[in-house]
């Protein structure tokens, strides 16, 4: 594929359709229009054409010829319309094959409706009743290592057969069922399930060995089934599919792909939080391992009351001014659920920010289970391993996280300062961490271009997708109030050495105006910045849009209502 | 407010018997269709444990077989040892039917008796279509209003306006004993005490501007999570016209309620916020 090619990237979300024109490896124009998949239009291509026309008018280019895209432009589409890709997962052991299948499905951008395994507590008839009540887009069946758990896999196939699961969009087409379990019983599974009229596809096992995962074939098969069986039933998509030779892919899958490649390219560990109206996604890349988890029903509009239910009202109230009483907060949250406001009042904005913190916190907690080393593998622990994090149950380690990204409604509706506070309070980064926002969700369309022009895609994402807010310096550990927590030394623009002490329990924002970067000498007092308790850390940090954030509130954080203190760099104390 | 033609599908979630005929006039309490669904109450008995015999030996000890009806605590298997001096028995934990017995594993499955399901007309009107074995479509002429949020499903009764205007709260003082069996219209907000008193005296439904979300949580006994309601069993149907908190009912809407006072009203609090597919509904048949 020539890198000189012009790309037209389309990302169709529930409310908006975004079109991005890329010419000569640069973003030429971005146009956003309303998505037209629902009534009254019921044709997704109308919204796509509107977005393309906007680009044509702005740039005087001809992209459309009648109902077709000109061959000079390569069209790549991702979509999250109609509520995304609804999937049901089955496995034999929930936290072994079931978890591998979950990772494959979540990595492919799915919204998991339910997960069944032979060892879950529901009796068989309840599994059958529950499966019958589901209307997924795709079912992914896993179970057993290759050659293992034969009878259990067959038993699970029989449960699926009895359940006679129907697809979301009517009973007049076959539900795609991807079998990615023990390959030695593929024939038996085929025999049991072929009678039900499932669109059965056999792929390699997601867990061929107890200590090995193989998610690629299942993930690819999900993309194929999404294109061939699912998206094609949404209004206008069959027409859109004729405009491009490429698959229309789930947007969340492309977001994950973009974040993964970005983390690999920059050699960083990364965690990203994406809050929508009804879902919260957490993505992570740790030591080159990608994971995505999803909390369905936890979001900022339809899912906002669920956050209060899951986290508890006290957890939400701790982020709000003490003068806001519980009754008013509950009423505002209830009204945000039944009538999502178009423009948020300042009170609603504060509440949304508080709820977003809890949504992310719940999401990160849930993510720790998914982002873990493979379960079922027997590990030998020596005495030295007792002090080693490598065998910890989750891959997440905030001290070893270099990048945190916030994206979705929670951040696009808030000021950058509020977004910063949401990330600091919810993710609680430790050590030295760069904080970014992707408010316009450029990860999905640019992630879709990775397979065609990786270099351009990786070049454009930091430029057009990510907004660098600043660097967080947050020592880990607990002190008592007003004790010195951290001393920071640096040389200012006038070539004068400056030293400033930060007390425990503070949150300070230091704008780094006129500076591109700054070399810091950080001396924590009995706290840890990544090199050990009280160990000095030297670091060159770049200036973000807001500057440098020094968070000495301790980890785990104790002071939730601490207001942010703005400290101009000139005000930092001097010393020789 | 304009009158509209309202049609309602009344179907049972299984096959059964349809009790009405095309063209028949029905009342809200008319039974449209009835049937049964298999019970979800299934118990697996590990008889070999109760009898202390090998699983493949259980078949020699069972006294109740597949398809037979059993009562709670009825003996389903019995084993005697030591020349009849020691007896071990397995009893049914429920009233039901023996679904299956596996002679190789020594396990027995007992399912509870089928659960009856019925659907009533909910509206007065005429049967305009029949779903064979499932139900019918009922049509009526009347007024229809929608709320924004509700709890509990269908209810009907005579509409009674309990406050002077749409901006007056509905407190326990306004809930009078004679309101039993009625659908009450309140004002800007209903208090928790009023809700509890209304349940006590048998009010079937309350239509009001708002309710404090905290009071609703206390009333239900749990937090509302996802905006999907209708199945709550709290003793009455509650419909909010405006939202949570103190929300006066607009004068035009309140005046309509005053006009409908004393007439039959058929209400449904079922709400599906996510899909916007179901809003709480108030129907005043002509």
Image (cartoon, coloured by chain):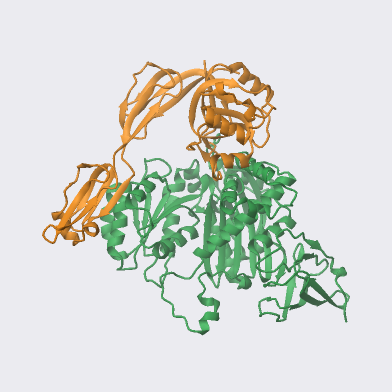
Chain colours: A green, B orange
Between A555 and A67, the one nearer to me in the picture? A555
> Measured from the top left, where is residue B221 in percent x and y?
54, 43
Residue drawn at (29%, 39%) of the image:
B113
**Residue found farthest to the left:** B83
**A31 relative to A80 in the view: left or right:** right
Where residue A132 sits: x, y (%)? 37, 45
Residue A377 horizontal/vertical position (percent): 41, 73
Mark yes or no: residue A24 visible: no
The one of A172 and A166 positioned closer to us in this rendering = A166
Q: Position of residue A53 (x, y in %)?
A: 63, 44
The residue at the point 66 percent across, 77 percent down is A530
A192 relative to B279, above or below: below
Residue at the (77%, 62%) spot, across then down: A546
Quarter assignment of residue A285: bottom right
Is residue B53 in sight in this rendering?
yes
The image shows residue A452, relative to residue A11, as above or below, that is below
**Quadrant that contains the C terminus of chain A:** bottom right
Above or below residue A436? Residue B218 is: above
Left or right placement of residue B215 versus residue A82 in this view: right
On the rendered structure, is A502 left or right of B55?
right
Observer-nearest of B195 and A571: B195
């Amino acid at each position: 594929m020539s890198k000189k090619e012009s790309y037209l990237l389309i990302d169709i979300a529930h409310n908006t359709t975004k079109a991005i024109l890329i010419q000569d490896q640069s973003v030429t124009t971005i146009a956003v229009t309303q998505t037209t998949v629902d009534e009254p239009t019921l044709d997704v291509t109308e919204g796509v054409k509107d977005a393309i026309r906007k680009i044509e008018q702005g740039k005087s280019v001809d992209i459309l010829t009648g109902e077709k895209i000109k061959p000079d432009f390569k069209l790549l589409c991702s979509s999250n319309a109609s509520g995304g890709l609804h999937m049901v997962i089955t496995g034999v052991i929930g936290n072994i094959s079931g978890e591998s299948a979950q990772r494959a499905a979540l990595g492919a951008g799915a919204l998991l409706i339910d997960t069944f395994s032979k060892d879950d507590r529901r009796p068989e008839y309840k599994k059958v009743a529950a499966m019958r009540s589901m209307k997924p887009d795709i079912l992914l069946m896993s179970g057993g290592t290759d050659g293992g758990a034969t009878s259990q896999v067959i038993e699970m196939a029989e449960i699926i057969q009895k359940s006679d699961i129907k697809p979301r969009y009517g009973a007049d087409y076959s539900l795609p069922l991807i079998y990615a379990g023990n390959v030695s019983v593929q024939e038996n599974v085929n025999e049991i399930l072929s009678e039900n009229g499932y669109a059965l596809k056999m792929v390699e096992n997601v867990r061929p060995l107890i200590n090995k995962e193989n998610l690629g074939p299942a993930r690819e098969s999900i993309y194929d089934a999404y294109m061939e069986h699912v998206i094609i039933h949404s209004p206008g998509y069959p027409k859109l599919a004729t405009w491009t030779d490429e698959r229309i892919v789930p947007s969340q899958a492309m977001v994950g792909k973009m974040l993964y490649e970005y983390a690999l390219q920059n050699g960083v560990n990364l965690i990203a939080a994406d809050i929508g109206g009804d879902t919260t996604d957490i993505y992570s890349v740790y030591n080159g391992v990608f994971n995505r988890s999803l909390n369905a029903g936890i979001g900022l509009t339809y899912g906002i009351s669920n956050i209060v239910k899951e986290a508890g009202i006290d957890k939400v109230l701790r982020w709000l001014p003490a003068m806001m009483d519980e009754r008013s907060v509950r009423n505002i949250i209830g009204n945000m659920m039944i009538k999502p406001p178009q423009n948020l009042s300042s009170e609603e904005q504060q509440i949304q920010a508080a709820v977003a913190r809890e949504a992310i916190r719940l999401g990160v907690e849930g993510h720790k289970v998914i982002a873990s080393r493979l379960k079922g593998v027997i590990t030998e622990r020596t005495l030295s391993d007792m002090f080693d994090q490598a065998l910890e149950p989750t891959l997440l380690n905030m001290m070893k996280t270099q990048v945190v990204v916030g994206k979705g409604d929670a951040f696009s509706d808030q000021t950058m300062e509020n977004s910063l506070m949401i990330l600091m309070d919810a993710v609680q980064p430790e050590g030295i961490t760069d904080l970014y926002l992707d408010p316009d969700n450029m990860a999905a369309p640019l992630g879709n271009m990775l397979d065609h022009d990786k270099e351009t895609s990786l070049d454009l994402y930091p430029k057009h997708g990510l907004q660098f807010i600043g660097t967080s310096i947050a020592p880990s550990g607990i002190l008592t109030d007003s004790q010195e927590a951290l001393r920071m030394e640096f040389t200012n623009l006038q070539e004068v050495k400056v030293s400033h002490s930060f007390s425990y329990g503070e949150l300070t924002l230091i704008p780094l105006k006129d500076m591109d970067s700054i070399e810091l000498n950080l001396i924590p007092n009995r706290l840890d910045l990544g090199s050990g308790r009280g160990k000095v850390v030297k670091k060159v940090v770049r200036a973000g849009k807001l500057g440098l954030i020094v968070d000495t509130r301790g980890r785990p954080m104790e002071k939730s209502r601490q207001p942010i203190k703005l400290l101009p760099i000139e005000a930092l104390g001097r010393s020789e | 407010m304009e009158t509209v033609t309202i049609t309602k599908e009344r179907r049972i979630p299984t096959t059964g018997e349809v009790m009405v005929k095309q063209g028949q006039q029905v009342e809200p309490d008319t039974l449209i269709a009835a049937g049964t669904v298999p019970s979800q109450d299934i118990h697996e008995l590990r008889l070999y444990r109760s009898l202390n015999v090998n699983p493949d030996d259980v078949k020699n000890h069972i006294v109740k077989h597949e398809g037979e009806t059993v009562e709670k605590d009825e003996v389903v298997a019995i084993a005697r040892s030591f020349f009849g001096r020691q007896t071990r028995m397995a009893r049914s934990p429920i009233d039901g039917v023996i679904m299956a017995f596996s002679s190789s594993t020594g396990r027995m499955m007992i399912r509870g008796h089928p659960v009856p399901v019925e659907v009533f007309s909910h509206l007065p009107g005429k049967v305009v279509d029949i779903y064979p074995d499932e139900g019918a479509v009922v049509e009526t002429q009347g007024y229809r209003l929608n709320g924004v949020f509700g709890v509990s499903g269908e209810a009907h009764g005579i509409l009674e306006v309990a406050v002077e205007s749409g901006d007056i709260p509905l407190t326990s003082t306004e809930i009078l004993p004679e309101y039993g069996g009625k659908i009450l219209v309140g004002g800007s907000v209903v208090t928790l005490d009023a809700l509890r008193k209304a349940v006590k005296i048998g009010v079937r439904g309350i239509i009001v501007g708002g309710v404090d979300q905290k009071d609703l949580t206390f009333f239900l006994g749990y937090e509302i999570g996802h905006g999907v309601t209708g199945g709550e069993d709290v003793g009455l149907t509650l419909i909010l016209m405006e939202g949570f908190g103190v929300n006066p009912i607009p004068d035009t809407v309140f005046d309509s309620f005053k006009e409908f006072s004393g007439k039959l009203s058929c209400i449904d609090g079922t709400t599906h916020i996510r899909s916007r597919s179901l809003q709480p509904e108030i129907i005043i048949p002509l």
